[in-house]
Amino acid sequence: MLERRTEPRIACSDKVNVEWADRSGRIRRALANLEDISKSGARLVLACPIPPKSPVLIANAKREARGTVRYCTARAFGYVLGVRFDPGVSWSAAADRAERGNPRRLDAHTIDLLSSLRPPRHVSH
């Protein structure tokens, strides 16, 4: 597959709030996992779909960014969204990591998944 990205993406595992208006104009909110981020956009995983071209607000306790959903793909674990930030908007994942002093925080689901992939240890007596 041809890589079309022109910017590096930084892996994350941060909880963020996402806000958008549904087709009837009602404001909707959901908790999402921020999977990765670049200068111009982000990839999120959440439990409900958001239609492509929908404007969204992504926020945590320290930052917020506005953007537009580029794609929404159903997966076994939820919906994966690609969001392009509005012009002039940025989100500094590197700053978030530096403030936490943690290069990558793994959530419990990821830790369980990684644990299940490790071969069992054989202890010799």
Image: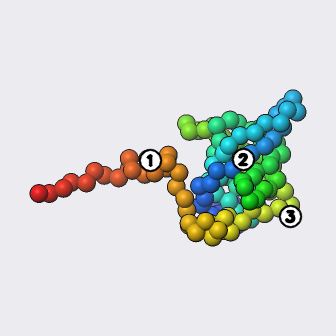
Foreground pick, 15 / 40: 15
- Tell me the kind of residue under disc 3: Gly
Q: Position of residue 29 (x, y in %)?
A: 75, 39
Q: Position of residue 38 (x, y in %)?
A: 70, 63
- Tell me the kind of residue under disc 1: Leu
Residue indicated by mark 3? 88
Of the two numbered discs 3 and 2 on the same chain, state the one appearing first in sequence: 2
Residue beneath the point at 21% across and 54% down: 122
Residue occupying the far top of the picture: 24
Residue beneath the point at 25% across and 54% down: 121
Q: Nearer the viewer, mark 3 or mark 2?
A: 2
Residue indicated by mark 1? 113
Task: Measure the C-alpha gap from mark 1 to mark 2.
Answer: 24 Å
In which quadrant will I find the N terminus? bottom right
Residue beneath the point at 43% across and 51% down: 114
In the displayed structure image, the side of residue 101 where residue 88 appears, left or right: right
In the displayed structure image, the side of residue 52 where residue 113 appears, left or right: left
Residue beneath the point at 44% across and 47% down: 113
Task: Measure the C-alpha gap from mark 3 to mark 2.
Answer: 20 Å
Residue occupying the far right of the picture: 25
Residue 8 in sight in this render: no
Q: Quadrant of residue 6?
A: bottom right
Residue indicated by mark 2? 17
Crowding at label 2, few (<14), some or many (≥20) Cα neighbours within 10 Å? some
